[in-house]
Amino acid sequence: MIGLADVEAATRRIDGRVRRTPVAPVGGADLGLAGPAWLKLEHLQHTGSFKARGAFNRVLAAAETGGLGAGVVTASGGNAGLAVAYAAGTLGVPAEVYVPLTAPAHKVTKLKALGAEVRQVGDEYAEANEAALARAAQTGALFCHAYDQPEICAGQGTVALEMLDQIDGLDTVILAVGGGGLLAGVAAALAGRARVVGVEPETIPTLHAALRAGHPVDVDVSGVAADSLGARRVGEIAYRVAVDTEVRSVLVADGDIVEARRLMWERFRLVVEHAAAAAVAAAVTGAYRPEPGERVGILLCGANTDPTDLAH
């Protein structure tokens, strides 16, 4: 479990290592909302996603105790691996990243460009994760989980403290959920101050299924956002935080995610990946309906995407 104190400690630890990303006010009517809205442009973060925050917090925390001698190992559909590779490279530490065979080619290319050793194993994140765990145990390298470690989750939550500072009277944050590291950090940071709405594709309802079952459960993984929201089950930390802070869970269809991604480009000239578009889709489709005057922040979590289909 993590709390506000962990997020505040992460903020101090990663200060100067990550970007303070801007927020952009948008007309609520542009997104079908009854009140004001802001887009948190976290897709402008180092390596193109919020993941740099958690990666730096995990690696720097280990550095404080001398735990980086054998380098770092992680498993990722792409974004977490990019973030860990970037953080490790910044500190001069070798990184080994395990990705599924289904990982997009452009993300694999970026990983290699950051100096990471890339290993492709299995068809899903879970299989790559098992291989990475075995490698870390064999070599003594620091294992960086993509979403279910306290330092990772707390680091992701630093984006929420920025939003509180940037958006006066923030009532609600809408964000996408895969494994739940971002959800866990943001909900812990905002507990008692703003509500959190977790959005998932109908084809990968990890949080939704966990809340219904009363514990994390495996789900099938498919759909347009599987490369970035492709965890088979929500993390234990995210589940506990979601229950304790009463996170609202909503689902959106793949077609609505695709249209929301196109809307971000056509209306605002923002290129985002399908995970980020999922959060927008919840607002556009009414999967989440704010009350009149509710002040909503929509977190655009990543931009590691192929933009060539946006003009069609």
Image (cartoon, helix red, strand yellow):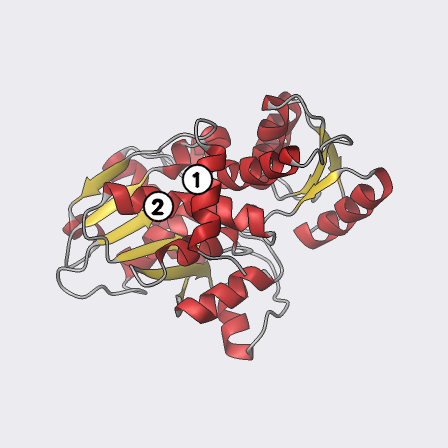
Q: Residue at x 79, y 42 (%)?
A: 136
Q: Name the residue under label 1.
A: 11
Where's the C terminus, which quadrant?
top left
Does the rendering let one see residue 258?
Answer: no
Q: Quadrant of the N terminus?
A: bottom right
Query: Which mark sits nearer the N-terminus, 1 or 2?
Result: 1
Q: Which amino acid does label 1 sit on?
A: Thr
Residue 171: percent from left, percent from top: 24, 58
The x, y position of residue 131, in whole percent, is: 79, 47
The residue that disc 2 covers is 161
Image spot of residue 58 (x, y percent): 59, 40
Residue at the location (32% across, 35% down)? 270
Image: 63 above or below 89: below
Mark 2 is surrounded, within 10 Å at the Cα level, by few (under 14), some (14 to 19) or many (20 or more) other residues, namely some
Q: Which residue is drawn at 64% across and 32% down?
A: 108
Contact between labelled residues 2 and 1, with CB atoms less than 8 Å apart = yes
| Depicted 1 relative to depicted 87: above or below | below
